[in-house]
Image (cartoon, grey):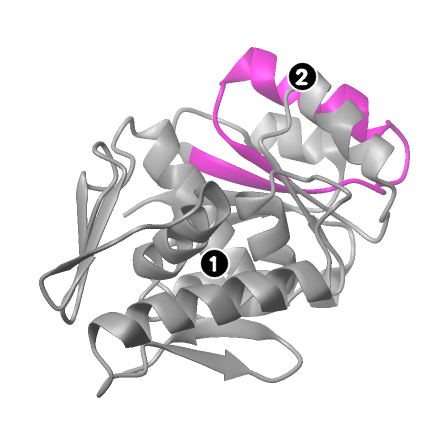
Amino acid sequence: MQTILIIEDDTEINDMLRILLTQNGYRTVSAYSGTEGILAHSKEISLILLDLMLPGRSGEDIIRDLKEKHNVPVIVTSAIHDISKKVDLFALGADDYITKPFHNEELLARIAARMRTAAGTTTSDQLVFQDIVMDTDAFSVTCNGTAVELSKHEFALLQLLLENPNRTCTKSLIYDTVWDYENSADDNTLNVHISKLRKKLKECNPDMDYIETVWGIGYRLKK
């Protein structure tokens, strides 16, 4: 079982994260300040959730000290939306960034992705959902036995959905993963790509609908 260190000074948020993570199979360690978090950090920790706006020391300094002590993925949580701030944090060693308030499903998906990367076991070369088969190494997809020609972003979008078959992929997660934090991503761009992806899959199997919309949140594979 993997252990996640939660560094969050808001007691209610810390407790909420602890309960959420425990219910999803993780062990947790809670800290309520940067100093306490650094002291609690050990080789038992697999990943860190770090609130950026902690009292006292800056979040940037805390990231640096955490990484120097034991280099595990750090996901920053903050109400700051400034894209330049995100870039600065990545330069300091943060591995991901999620803006408050966030959806629990998005946080869990980001945690799972960072855990896979840190373990050196990114997703399998082959992803399968019903009659969709994706080979990530060959950059190929078949649906109902027919090859599907996808653009770079369509492929990445389908890959994200296939990697999270039991979760809703929020728009924020899709923008950051598929468009890699580009400012160009917006609702219209995403809607166009989803529409094209659905159409291409439908052409291969007219009897199936593979992707469903979760209104106001994002998209998921349809069971």
Q: Residue at x 86, y 28 (%)?
A: 58
Tell me which segment is drawn in magenta.
Answer: 46-75
Which image quarter is the C terminus in?
Answer: bottom left
Q: Can residue 19 be seen in this view?
A: no
Residue 81 screen position, x and y as percent: 85, 49
Residue 155 screen position, x and y as percent: 39, 48
Residue mark closest to the camera, 1 vs 2: 1
Q: Can residue 110 be seen in this view?
A: yes
Extreme residue toward the left, this view: 145
Residue 26 screen position, x and y as percent: 37, 54
Q: Does the magenta portion include 49? A: yes
Q: Which residue is drawn at 45% across and 41% down?
A: 152
Amino acid type at circle 2 is Asp
Precedes in sequence: disc 1 or disc 2? 2
Q: Residue at x 71, y 18 (%)?
A: 92
Q: Residues within 10 Å of mark 1 (few under 14, many from 20)?
A: some
